[in-house]
Image: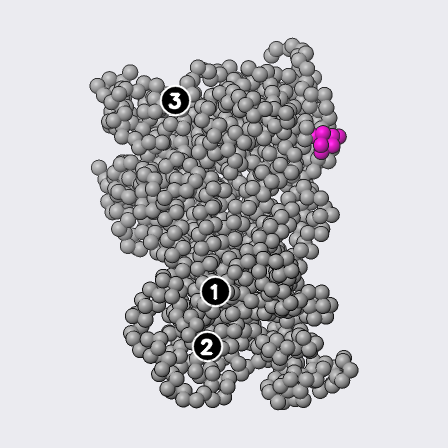
């Protein structure tokens, strides 16, 4: 393992973020004291199974948690500004300029009744009002070209594009104002594997050329391995491990991360399936102690009594597990 | 591509013709399916009302002859359709030498004007209210006030009309109670006349608008709530657009589309309902003419009005259908472009 | 065998609008059910009582005719007790026929697809746009209506397109559902698929369409009656309004003549409207929790 | 050799092209042939991306959708022409599990209903007790107990439980073949292995064959025997799973396999991939090879002449590409 202190500044910091969903049957804790940061120019993956809260975290960063959800605690720093304290107006001015989104599900992210040029133009004009018509058109055409789309897309409606093209339009739109941070929420889900690769590479290409930092939400570990620099693993609303992608894949520390890595079906060798079983808890009543205790093969009384904090055990590598901690200490 | 394709226009035109045909056929056929024939039952009705009709049998025979009711049904039917196409509705029964068309024609502009204005108002107000009700960002004081506009939604137009008539016209004497314009003015392009026409139309208009806008509002609210959860709506917010722009371009713009389809469907109901309103306010439109025809047993005038109403509905639906693809680019989108 | 538990699984059936609307309709139904036990319904006919008496709270009111009488000597209370259930009956019959026809045509269209679907869908689409009252007037003017049943049958002519469209749309969506496919894989025939698997899931839609149909038919019936085209011998709410307006009761200030039937009709329409809205909210959960 | 349990002959399905359609018909499945034998039990994978015709094929086999041309024979009998009795026999022996483990439950009924329905139509048990024993037996196979789940409503089960119940239901009928249409696409990674493992056990211990329909080549690689890869309704390549995944022959299959993101951060994608002009594929009617527009090795004749299947290796490995015309695999 490389022990090198990373001095690259942090462009996005999520501090102690909690999001609750208030339902008639009690509050669901969708995100619980989530802490992580994104360094300038890196791609960080946020992974976990469905319902683990990864999309909630993305929405919270964008300050777009929908009712009945609510950010109950925490701070979100983007490029030196704390978002939770901003007024609606200040937030609006900051959105897209500093924080853009490549949305999930390429199918419905574009308004079906507006042409591509109108939707891209809207994003640009909202922040650069005085832009001339010709300049705007030039900008949009350039952006389309940047993501490998032909110029005729400019005049087209979303339903005339394929899924991959729509998602590339979304990428073009996200980079329109050259934001320092892009949140990509499962940007390639529901796309066929070849198209997925094309879209993923478009993202990588854009990132390389613009130096933008990216938070990539996902559940496909293969895709994460291909794209990200660091991975944050989330389980039932809690971060359990955050670390460099090589470390996570080669030597996963948290038992849940190990489980995730082991269950990836390989395309390189045919091997026996590893089957694990375990209960998940009711999200309304998280157990005291470690959130993963019901499925963990190494669970001890210590795990049942108190929740392990997310602690840095190597530079940029954090784990929330008593066993890992004591192993390191020994 | 968006826009009108030949296929689409042809299909819509087919629907237009079909609607008129079904309506006209129902008007022709159903009275004849009932036991007895129209003329006999009409005379019987007269007997019921007036106690006794002189020479009832001869009257029936004469009328049957005049209407060709002795011919086989299918001949009557084709003659009826043929006349309909030529806009020949026959003579008025109550005012013999006058044709039914001449009886109805003066009433048409009144009805069409009232309907058009009522429709524009209720559609515009209703959808605005509904869109605001369904939008998450609407200020809460407004959210609390808006539902008040739904108060009269479930009440039929004419019943609300009666209440307005009683309280506003008869009790408070604020507005005239009946007719299309004051007897003191001379019809024509003069200001007093126009002012009078407007004054006299306020109550009928208000009864239609207040009772029908709630329907639009409810429909629009539902659609807007749906749009609120669409990915593109969320993305528009994430883009940092102003709330007004998000509301109109990414909310109303999309939610209004199904409302337009409902507009087509609502035409028939609106026309039906406004006929009773005209009767209540003795407004000189087709509804009132229809009522007079009912009183005078004027069968042909009734049929004429009915067919005209069907024609008006079908035409407005057809025009709306032609307009629709220009608003929604997906509507004539062909499978080959998938 | 097959256990259903809507009440336990769907607490939203106890929707607030549904309960309020239901209570309103219940009150109106009780007028017709309980009224005849306490009041002589013969007083609803011409000449049974003194003419033009004001209601009991007015200056010349009379305990024998608490809601007053009109100018032909009919007791208003008795007229309401006779007229209210007949209005409800018309709506019920017409809407039931409409729903029955709609179920058959809608499931035929949804199931068979192709030409059958094309024909039924096109017919239902055009029938919904036809201005029903105009056509009804012409028909009613020619059909001698002795009682409300005939009127209900005529109104049923316009009660089928909506349920047909609803059922068709539902069958089309439900047909693709995994559980319908599962039932087919389990050997269920078309009948079982329709009635065991699909129908329970359509209930809120059907119920909403049914209550909407009832109030639509009552509206049509009242409209015809107000125009003087209903059965002339039996009291009905619309007929009372027709007679009142014919006698210029509004201008003459005889409010006890025309106002009670209008109030009852308003309760009926508001009640059914609330029920329909409540059912709509059950059918489309996303409408729930939005202020209205 | 015995009559195959399922024989698909020349199966063709065309959508659209009707009287009111101005668009040309879409051929979803074109002259597809397949034989599945009762023993030995095998897992046959039908793989392809969206629009490949794999779901059309599943629907046709299960009798949800009639074919435009061709036949599906169950033990020599055309399933389109069977009487009710024959169809019931077919239903009992050819069962299915589907992708969405929630959608297959009627929200109106308890979980029990899914077993009751099958019991009602297939005479398997004479008494309630016998029926219950059968159900318990089937549930045991997937690691569930009747008293845990039967009285519950589907939304009270977890996604993994729901999918396992569906497998149990299919198994209870003792079918010879199970059509598994994307059975693991909607379940989380850790549960995926469990479902796949049950499929293997059903094949090995109970002699049940599978038609595994999926877009995910890596899971197919882990459990599959035979494999057919479809592209726009046509077979691109067929043969043994290991041969295809490890030595793909058809340019499309090569592209497909190269696009699967490897779960290894050290083996990144070759970034030189040419972006396929994805919008150019379906616009015009195809007379020759359907992959022509995207193929890096295309020849002139591919444009006009549809390539037949050529043998490219052992175990019936075939690819439909003129590159292998001489029979010399490269």
Where does label 2 land, which residue? B94
Q: Quadrant of residue D126?
A: bottom left
Q: Chain of mark 2?
A: B
Where does label 3 land, which residue? D255
Give the magenta-colored segment's residue range.
Answer: A85-91
Are both tags, 1 and 2, on one chain?
yes
Q: Position of residue A218 (x, y in %)?
A: 55, 28
Q: Position of residue D122 (x, y in %)?
A: 37, 54
Residue at (25%, 39%) from the top-left corner? D9
| The one of D299 and A280 positioned closer to us in this rendering | D299
Q: Residues within 10 Å of mark 1 (few under 14, many from 20)?
A: few
Q: Position of residue C195 (x, y in %)?
A: 44, 59
Q: Nearer the viewer, mark 3 or mark 1?
A: 1
Answer with left or right where residue A27 lies relative to residue B227: right
Q: Residues within 10 Å of mark 3 (few under 14, many from 20)?
A: some
Mark before the other along the chain sequence, 1 or 2: 2
Are both tags, 2 and 3, on one chain?
no
Q: Position of residue A221 (x, y in %)?
A: 52, 25
Q: Quadrant of residue A318?
A: top right
Q: For residue B182, say whether it is visible.
A: yes
Q: Is residue A87 magenta?
A: yes
Q: Residue furthest right?
A: C59
Q: Chain of mark 1?
A: B
Disc on res. B105:
1
Residue at (40%, 31%) from the top-left corner? D49
Which color scheme is applied? one colour
Secondary structure of the residue carrying tag 1 is: helix
């Amino acid at each position: 393992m490389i022990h090198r202190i990373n001095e690259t500044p942090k462009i996005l910091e999520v501090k102690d973020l909690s999001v609750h969903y208030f339902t008639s049957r009690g509050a669901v804790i969708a995100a619980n004291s989530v802490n992580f940061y994104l360094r300038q120019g890196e791609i960080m993956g946020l992974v976990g199974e469905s319902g683990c809260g990864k999309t909630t975290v993305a929405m919270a960063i964008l300050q777009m948690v929908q009712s009945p959800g609510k950010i109950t605690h925490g701070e979100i720093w983007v490029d030196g500004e704390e978002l939770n304290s901003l007024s609606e107006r200040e937030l609006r001015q900051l959105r897209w300029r500093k924080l853009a989104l490549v949305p999930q599900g390429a199918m419905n992210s574009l308004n079906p009744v507006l042409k591509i040029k109108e939707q891209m133009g809207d994003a640009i004009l909202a922040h650069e009002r005085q832009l001339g018509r010709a300049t705007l058109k030039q900008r949009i055409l350039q952006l389309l070209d940047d993501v490998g789309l032909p110029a005729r897309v400019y005049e087209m409606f979303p339903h005339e594009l394929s899924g991959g093209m729509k998602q590339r339009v979304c990428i073009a739109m996200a980079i329109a104002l050259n934001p320092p941070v892009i949140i990509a929420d499962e940007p390639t889900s529901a796309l066929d594997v070849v198209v997925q690769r094309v879209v993923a590479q478009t993202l990588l290409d854009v990132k390389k050329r613009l130096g933008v930092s990216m938070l990539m939400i996902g559940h496909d570990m293969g895709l994460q391995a291909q794209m990200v620099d660091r991975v944050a693993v989330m389980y039932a609303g809690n971060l359990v491990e955050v670390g460099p992608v090589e470390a996570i894949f080669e030597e996963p520390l948290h038992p849940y991360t190990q489980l995730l890595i082991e269950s990836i079906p390989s395309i390189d060798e045919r091997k026996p399936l590893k089957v694990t079983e375990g209960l998940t808890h009711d999200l309304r009543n998280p157990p005291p102690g470690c959130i993963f205790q019901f499925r963990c093969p190494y669970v001890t009384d210590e795990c049942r009594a108190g929740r392990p904090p997310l602690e840095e055990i190597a530079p940029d590598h954090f784990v929330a597990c008593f066993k890992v901690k004591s192993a390191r200490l020994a | 591509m968006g826009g009108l394709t030949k296929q689409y226009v042809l299909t819509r035109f087919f629907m237009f013709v079909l609607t008129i045909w079904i309506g006209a056929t129902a008007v022709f056929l159903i009275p004849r399916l009932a036991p007895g024939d129209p003329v006999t039952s009409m005379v019987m009705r007269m007997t019921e009302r007036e106690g006794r009709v002189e020479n009832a049998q001869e009257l029936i025979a004469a009328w049957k002859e005049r209407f060709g009711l002795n011919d086989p049904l299918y001949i009557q039917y084709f003659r009826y359709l043929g006349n309909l196409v030529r806009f020949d509705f026959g003579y008025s029964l109550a005012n013999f030498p006058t044709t039914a068309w001449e009886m109805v024609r003066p009433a048409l502009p009144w009805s069409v004007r009232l309907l058009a204005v009522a429709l524009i108002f209720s559609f515009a107000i209703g959808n605005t209210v509904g869109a605001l009700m369904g939008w998450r960002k609407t200020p809460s004081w407004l959210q609390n006030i808006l539902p008040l506009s739904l108060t009269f939604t479930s009440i039929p137009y004419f019943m609300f009309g009666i209440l307005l008539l009683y309280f506003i016209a008869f009790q408070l004497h604020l507005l005239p109670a009946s007719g299309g314009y004051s007897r003191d003015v001379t019809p024509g392009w003069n200001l007093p006349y126009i002012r009078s026409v407007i004054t006299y139309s306020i109550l009928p208009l208000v009864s239609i608008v207040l009772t029908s806008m709630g329907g639009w509002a409810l429909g629009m609210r539902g659609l807007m709530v749906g749009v609120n959860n669409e990915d593109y709506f969320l993305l528009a917010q994430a883009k940092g657009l102003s709330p007004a722009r998000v509301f109109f371009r990414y909310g109303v713009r999309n939610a209004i589309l199904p409302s337009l389809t409902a507009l087509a469907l609502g035409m028939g109901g609106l026309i039906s309902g406004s006929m009773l309103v005209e009767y209540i306010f003795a407004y000189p439109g087709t509804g009132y003419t229809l009522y007079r025809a009912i009183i005078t047993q004027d069968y042909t005038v009734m049929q004429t009005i009915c067919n005209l109403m069907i024609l008006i509905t079908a035409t407005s639906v057809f025009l709306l259908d032609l307009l629709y693809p220009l608003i929604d680019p997906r509507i004539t989108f062909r499978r080959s472009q998938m | 065998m097959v256990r259903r538990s809507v009440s336990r699984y769907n607490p939203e059936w106890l929707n607030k609008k549904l309960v309020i609307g239901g209570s309103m309709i219940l009150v109106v139904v009780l007028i017709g059910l309980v009224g005849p036990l306490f009041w002589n319904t013969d007083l609803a006919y011409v000449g049974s009582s003194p003419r033009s008496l004001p209601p009991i709270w007015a200056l010349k009111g009379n305990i024998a005719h608490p809601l007053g009488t009109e100018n032909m000597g009919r007791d208003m209370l008795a007229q309401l007790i006779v007229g209210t259930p007949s209005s409800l009956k018309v709506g019920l019959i017409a809407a039931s026929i409409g729903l029955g026809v709609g179920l058959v045509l809608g499931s035929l269209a949804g199931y068979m697809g192709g030409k059958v679907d094309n024909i039924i869908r096109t017919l239902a689409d055009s029938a919904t746009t036809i201005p029903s009252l105009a056509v009804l007037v012409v028909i009613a003017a020619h059909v001698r209506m002795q009682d409300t049943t005939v009127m209900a049958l005529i109104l049923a002519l316009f009660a089928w397109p909506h349920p047909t469209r609803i059922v068709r749309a539902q069958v089309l969506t439900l047909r693709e559902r995994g559980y319908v496919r599962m039932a087919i894989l389990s050997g269920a025939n078309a009948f079982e698929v329709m009635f065991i698997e699909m129908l329970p899931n359509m209930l809120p839609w059907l119920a909403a369409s049914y209550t909407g149909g009832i109030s639509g038919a009552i509206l049509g019936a009242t409209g015809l009656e107000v125009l003087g085209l209903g059965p002339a011998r039996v009291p009905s709410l619309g007929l009372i309004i027709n007679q009142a307006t014919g006698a210029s009761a509004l201008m003459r200030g005889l409010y006890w003549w025309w106002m009670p039937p209008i109030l009852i009709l308003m309760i009926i329409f508001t009640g059914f409207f609330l029920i329909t809205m409540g059912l709509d909210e059950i059918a489309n959960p996303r409408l729930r929790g939005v202020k209205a | 050799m015995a009559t195959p349990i399922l024989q698909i002959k020349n199966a063709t399905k065309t959508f659209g092209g009707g009287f009111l359609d101005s668009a040309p018909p879409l051929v979803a499945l074109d002259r597809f042939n397949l034989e599945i034998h009762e023993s030995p039990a095998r897992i046959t994978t039908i793989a392809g991306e969206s629009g490949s015709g794999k779901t059309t094929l599943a629907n046709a086999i299960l009798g949800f959708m009639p074919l435009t041309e061709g036949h599906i024979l169950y033990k020599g009998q055309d399933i389109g022409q069977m009487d009710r009795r024959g169809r019931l026999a077919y239903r009992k022996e050819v069962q299915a599990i589907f992708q969405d483990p929630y959608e297959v439950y009627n929200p109106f009924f308890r979980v029990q209903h899914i077993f009751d329905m099958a019991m009602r139509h297939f005479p398997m048990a004479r008494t309630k007790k016998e029926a219950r024993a059968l159900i318990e037996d089937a549930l045991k196979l997937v690691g569930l107990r009747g008293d845990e789940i039967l009285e519950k409503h589907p939304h009270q089960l977890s996604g993994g439980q729901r999918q396992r119940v569906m497998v149990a239901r299919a198994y209870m009928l003792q079918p010879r073949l199970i059509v598994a249409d994307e059975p693991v696409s909607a379940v989380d990674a850790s549960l995926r292995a469990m479902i796949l493992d049950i499929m293997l056990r059903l094949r090995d211990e109970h002699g049940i064959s599978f038609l595994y329909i999926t877009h995910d080549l890596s899971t197919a690689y882990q459990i599959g025997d035979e494999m057919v890869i479809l592209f726009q309704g046509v077979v691109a390549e067929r043969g043994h799973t290991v041969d295809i995944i490890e030595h793909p022959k058809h340019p499309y299959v090569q592209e497909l396999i190269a696009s699967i993101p490897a779960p290894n951060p050290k083996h990144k994608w070759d970034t030189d991939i040419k972006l396929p002009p994805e919008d150019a594929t379906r616009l015009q009617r195809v007379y020759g090879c359907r992959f022509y527009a995207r193929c890096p090795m295309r020849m002139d004749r591919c444009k006009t002449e549809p390539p037949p299947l050529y043998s490219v290796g052992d175990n019936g490995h075939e690819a439909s590409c003129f590159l292998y015309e001489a029979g010399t695999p490269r």
